[in-house]
Amino acid sequence: MTDFLNVTSVTKDQNGKGRFRPIGVAFPGGENRNYLFKILLDANPVNGEIMAFVPQADAAAAGHRLALPDKMRVTTPVQGAHDRTRFTHVGIAFPASEGANYVFKAYLDAVPVNGELLLFPWEKASGSTAE
């Protein structure tokens, strides 16, 4: 697996054809983290949808699908009292179906002011503290 994923937003052109706009990058959580992906956005998706792709240079080597849960909680970290981080639920994400060229797709109900999203397995509590 690559060290990062390209995060895009899909917009439709005047003919209704989908166009992918790069808006950020996603990093896998790794063994020592309790989240699945950390997403850093350079722009917020106007339509509330993002998709993550393996970078084109690594696409040939990434022939296998990631083992992801059936659905994931999309959160944004917010600094709370006493420097504790809380996670505000802002959406849901699903892994790609068999044969799709993307890794996961997320549907956002809100966009993060800080440009940061964390994906957790759905069963994780959204109020837990960071890493």
Image (cartoon, rainbow, N blue to C red):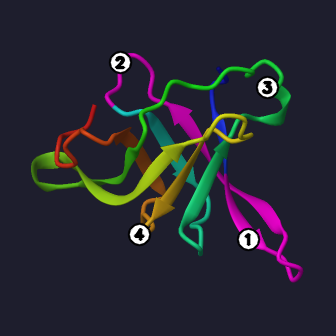
| Tally of numbered discs | 4
**Which region of the structure is painted magenta?**
8-34
Disc 2 residue crowd, few under 14, some 14–19, many 20+, Cα 10 Å: few
**Label 1 – label 2 distance at C-alpha:** 35 Å
Q: Position of residue 56 (x, y in %)?
A: 83, 35
Find numbered disc 3 in the image and state the secondary structure of the residue it sits on: helix
Find numbered disc 2 in the image and state the secondary structure of the residue it sits on: loop
| Camera-side mark, 2 or 3 | 3
Q: Which mark is residue 11?
A: 1
Question: Of label 1 and label 2, which has the lower sequence position?
Answer: 1
Is disc 3 in contact with disc 4, using a CB cutoff of under 8 Å?
no
Q: Amino acid at mark 3?
A: Asp
Q: Which mark is residue 32?
A: 2
Among all residues in the image, which is located at the extreme front?
98
Question: Of label 1 and label 4, which has the lower sequence position?
Answer: 1
Q: Is residue 37 left or right of residue 124?
A: right
Kindly identify the residue that appears in the image at 51 percent across and 24 percent down: 67
**Label 1 – label 3 distance at C-alpha:** 24 Å
Tell me if residue 51 is in the magenta stretch: no
Among all residues in the image, which is located at the extreme left?
82
**Label 2 – label 3 distance at C-alpha:** 24 Å
**Label 4 – label 2 distance at C-alpha:** 28 Å
**Label 1 – label 4 distance at C-alpha:** 17 Å
The residue where tag 3 is placed is 58
Kindly identify the residue that appears in the image at 41 percent across and 69 percent down: 109
Name the residue nearer the viewer: 118 or 115: 118
Q: Amino acid at mark 4?
A: Asp
The residue where tag 4 is placed is 109
| Camera-side mark, 4 or 2 | 4
Name the residue nearer the viewer: 97 or 110: 97
